[in-house]
Image (tube, grey):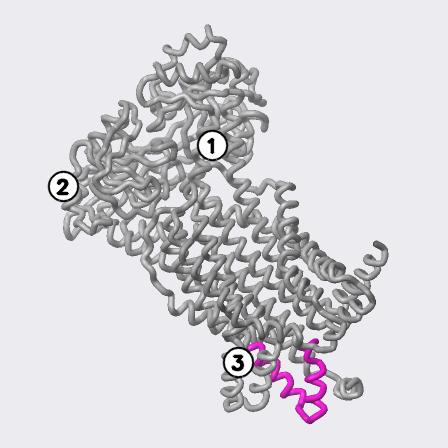
Amino acid sequence: MFAILSLFKTFVLRDCLINRVRTLITTGGIALGIAVFLAISLANRTALSSFRDSVDRVAGRANLEISPVAGRYMDEAVLEDLSWLWMAGGKYAAVLSADVCIGEGDGETESSEVIQLIGIDMLADSEFFSFASGGGTGGSRSLENLSGVLLGRKIAQEEGLSPGSSLTLSVDDRTVSVPVTGILEATGLGDAYSGRLLVCDIPLAQEILGERGKISRVEIIVAQESLEPISEKLNRELPAGLAAEPPGSRTRAIEKMTRSFEYNLWALTFIALIVGMFLIYNTIAITVIRRRVEIGTLRAMGLRRRSIVLLLCGEAALIGLAGSIAGACFGILLADWSLAAVAETYQRLYFNIPLEKVALDYRLIFLAVLIGVTLTVVAALPPALEGSLVEPISATRRLSNEEGIDRFSSPLFLCSLLLCSCGWFLSGLPPVDGFPLWGYLAALLYVFALALALPLILKLLLPAIACLLDTVLGLEGKLAALTLRRTIGRTSVAVATLAVGIAMMISLAIMIGSFRETVTDWARQTLVADLWMRPAARDGGSHSAGFPASIERSLADVDGVRAVEPWSESPVLYRGRPAILGGARFEVVGRFGNLSFVSGRPSREVCALITGRKAIVSESFALRHNVSPGDTVELPVRSGVLALRVVDVYYDYVSDAGYVVIPRDLYVESLGDESITSFAIVLQEGVDPDRVRSRIVRDLGGLSRFSIRTTGELRQRILEIFDKTFAVTYALHTIAIVVAILSVMNALFALITESRREFGILSYLGMSAASLRRMVLVEAGLLGLLGSIAGTALGFVLSILLIYVINKQSFGWTVRYMVPGDFIIQSFFIVFFTAVLSGLIPSRMASRTPAPEVVRSE
C-alpha cells in the first residue's frame, strides 16, 4: 500500500506539478462543466422547493383538501354540507387565495410586484394555520386582526409599512386600500411565499377580491386511519365540479408541468459535462503517449497492469476532484444568476412564487462533486486500459498506440455508422412520461458517432490537406498537417471535443433562431387587432386578474372602436394534468381574427363551425393528450362533466399546458364566471391607434385600471419574454465553447511536449524559431478548422433532433426550421481565430526548444 502511495506521489503528483499548465487547463474545463450543472440544479431545486414549501405552509397539518376541478373559486355554501366531519373526528377550515399586486394609480398603468393574498378563518383551530404576528395591540388571533391584514415581513420591510399603515392593492382592474394590523413573523404561514404575502380574515379577503360568498378550497384534518373512507365519501357526495384530494396533489400536478422545462435544462448542462469528459480523455491519453517509456519501465520492474490502471485513473480522479470542488464553488456563485434567468419562465408559465435567492442544498453540492469525479474516472478508463497494455519491449516505440488507433480506424467508423442507425431509430420513439428520453439518448449517440468516425476521416483527409498546404503555406504548413496525421488519436479527440462544443452552439442557435422566427411570424399573423388591453394586476404578474363583464360594453362605446373581442381563461384539470379552458366570441374571432390551424383551413371557416358544445384545442394540448379533430374531450367543470367535440387544432405559443377554447356563453354557463381576462380591440379603418388609446384611458380611467398596448408593442413584449426565457441557454453554449477551446490548447501543449525531439532536430537543421511558431499556429488553425467543420455538420443533425423531436415532445410546439446563416458564419470564424490564438503560448514554447540538448540525447 505504501509502495503504491509513494509511486502515486512520484508518478502522478510530480507530473501534474511539472505540467501544471496542462493540469490547470483540464481542471478548468471540468470546473466549468460542474459549475453549470450545479448552478442549474440549484436554481431548479430552489424554484420547486419554494413552491412546495409555500403550499405545505399554507396547508399546515391538513391531509385532505376540497378544491374546484375547474376555475379558481367555489361557493362557500359547501361548508354547510361538511358538518358531519366533526362527528367523524375531523376538522375543516376554508381558505381564499389569489394573486394581487401592490400599487396604485389611475387609468393606464403597470402595477408593481405580485404578492399572495390568503384569506383564512382567523378564529379557526391553530392546527390549520400556524402563524404569529408582532407590532399590533392584540395577539395574532385577536379580534383587531379581523378588520385588517397581517403583512409578510419581507413586504413590510420593502414597502416601509408598520401596524397602523394603509396598504393600497391592485386587484383585477381596481385599487383597494386596506389597513395593516400586524406584521407576520417569519415562521409557519408567515414564511410562505418568501414572506411576500398578506393574511386576513375570509370576509375581508372576499371584499378585497370582490368575490363575496366564494372560497378557493377547504382544508381538512382527519385521523390517518379514516383518511381513505372519508375521502371516498366526500368524492361521492360533493357537488359536481369539486374534488377531495391530498394537498400534495396540487404540488404533483405542477411538478408534472415543470418537468419538461427542468429536464431540458439538465440535459443541456450534461452536454457541457460531456465536453469535459472528452477533455479528461484527451489528458489521460496524452499522459499515456508521453510516458510510455516510464510505463514500460514500471512494467519491467514487475508492476501489474491493474496498478497502472489505478495510477492513471487516480490521476484523473485527482484532477476531477480538484475541478469539481472548484466548479462547485463557482456554481454556487453562478446559481443566483441562473435562478434569475429561469425565474421568469417558472413564474409566467407555472406558478407565481417569489424566487429571489438560491437555497443551498449540500446534498446536491456533494452529488455534483461526485458526478464530476465519476465522469472523469469513466472518461479516463479507456486510455488507462490502453496504458496498462504497454509491454516493456514496446515502450520505446513512441507511436505504438497511435498505430493502434490508426489500425482500428475502419472498425471504429463501422461502429459510428451503427450508432447513427441506433440514433435514427430512437428518435422515432414516443416520449417517456412526457420527457423526450429517447431523443436525448439519440443526440448522445450522434455525438459519440462523430467521435468514432473522426480517426478514419482525418486519416484520409490530412494527407490531402498536407499537399494543399505545401502549395499555399510551404514546408511549415505541410509539416503541421503531417504531424497531426502522425498523432491521429490525439488529433481526433481534440477535434471531437471542439466539434461537440461547436455542435451544441450551432444546434441551439438554429433551434432558438427557428423558434424565435416562428413566434415572430405567429404573432404577426395571429395578433391582428389594433389594441390589446388587460387588467393592471395581470400586467403586474397576477395570474387570476380579470375585468368585470360591464367593461366590454363601455369599450364598445368608445369613439373609433369597431369591435371588441373578449377573452376569458381559467385553469382546469384534464386527465390529472393542468390545462387552460378559454372562452371566446367566435363570431368576432371569425370576422376579425386570424388563428392559424394545423389543418390549414381559414380561420373564418373554422370559427363558423364552433357552436354549442364544440371546441378548438391548442397544438400543445393535442400532442400532450393525443387529441385529434373529431375526438371528444371531457372536462370536469362546475356544472359537471363537459363533453366537447374537437373541431380543429390551432397553433399557439403562449403556454405549454395547452388550451381548450369554447364559445363564451358556454364558458360562462360551465364555470359561472363572467370575468374577462383581456380584450382585443379592432378599430375603424383609418383611425389612429394611439388616439383611440388616449380616449379609452380618458373614458375608462376612472372606472378601471389597465394596461393597453398597440399590436406592435405587444409583439415586442412577446419577443422580450422569449429572449429572457432563453438567456440561460445562451450562457450554456458559450461555456461549452470555452471548454472546447481549452481542449485545443491542451492538445497543443501535449503536442509540444511530445514533439520536443522533432522540434529540436528541425531547429538544428536550420528551421528558424519563427518557422516553428508558424508551424504550431498552423496546427492550431487546422484543429480549429476541422473542429468547426465537424461541429457544424453535427450541429445541423442535432438541431433537427431538437426541433422535430425533443422540443415537440417536451412542449408540443411546431417550429419551422430556419438557419441563422450570418450567426453560423460569424461563429465559424470566431472559433477558428480563437483556436489559432490558443496556439500562441504553445508556439512560443516550441520555438524555444534547445536544439543542442535534443541532438546530444539522440
The C terminus lies in quadrant = bottom right
State the extent of the magenta-drawn residues as a range.
752-781
Residue 774: image x %, image y %?
Answer: 60, 84
Identify the residue position indicated by label 1 in the image: 251
Tell me how far mark 3 sits from mark 1, CA to CA: 57 Å
**Residue that appears at 41% across and 52% down:** 806
- Mark positioned earlier in the residue sequence (3 or 2): 3
Report the amino acid beneath label 3.
Leu
Residue 144: image x %, image y %?
Answer: 50, 15
Tell me how far mark 3 sits from mark 2, CA to CA: 65 Å
Hey, which residue is sitting farthest top in the picture?
87
Identify the residue position indicated by label 2 in the image: 608
Identify the residue position indicated by label 3 in the image: 462
Residue 326: image x %, image y %?
Answer: 67, 54
Hey, which residue is sitting farthest right in the picture?
2
Whether the magenta-drawn stretch holds residue 57 is answered as: no
The vertical placement of 803 against 833, above or below, is above
| Disc 2, SS | helix
